[in-house]
Image (tube, helix red, strand yellow):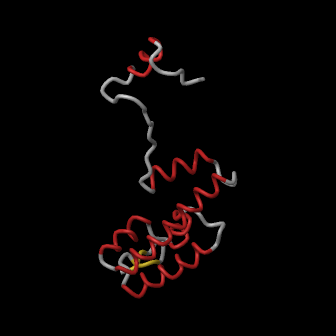
Amino acid sequence: MTNKRMGRPFVYDEEELRAICKRLDKWVEDDKNVWFGCFFEKEKITQEHFMARGDEYDFIRESVEKARGIQQARLINGALHKRLSDGMAKFCLINNHGWTEKTQISGDKANPLAIVLDEIDGSTKSLTE
């Protein structure tokens, strides 16, 4: 069965999926390529459809994991070296790589104002000193 609008099959067999993985591996080697959406748009397959097939085929999962690792490194390095927007890199890492933004609190979790109150009564040093 083919998709007449795009000229591509709705159902990809193992051979076609292996070929897509090889093209993904080659695509991700290019330092200019960061966002998977561009690759999958060119391939005329949705990222979700392709990723779902990873449950059936280990070679898909391995190819995607490798590409995701490279993508994550490119986002981090791009932001650190000011080649990419740090806000956009952060957005991508949070939404696509499971990163979370954390606020670290020092002191007593049960009573977070304790450190401030201790500073006021003189039992701790000022945080700004």
Q: Relative to 91, say whether 76 is above or below.
A: below
Image-quadrant location for residue 76 = bottom right
Residue 86 picture location, percent across and down = 61, 47
From this viewpoint, which residue is outermost toward the top? 121
Number of numbered callouts drawn: 0
Image-quadrant location for residue 27 = bottom right
| Residue for point 39% across, 20% down | 113
Q: Relative to 107, say whether 66 is above or below.
A: below
| Residue for point 48% across, 84% down | 19
Residue 12 picture location, percent across and down = 38, 80
From this viewpoint, which residue is outermost toward the front? 123
| Residue for point 43% across, 46% down | 100
From this viewpoint, which residue is outermost toward the bottom? 15
Q: Relative to 104, say whether 55 is above or below.
A: below
Q: Relative to 41, say whether 56 is above or below.
A: below
Q: Nearer the viewer, residue 115 or 21?
A: 115
Residue 84 picture location, percent across and down = 65, 53
| Residue for point 30% across, 77% down | 56
In the image, is 55 to the left or to the right of 65? left
Q: Which quadrant holds the C terminus?
A: top right
Residue 52 picture location, percent across and down = 34, 69
Q: Which quadrant holds the N terminus?
A: bottom left
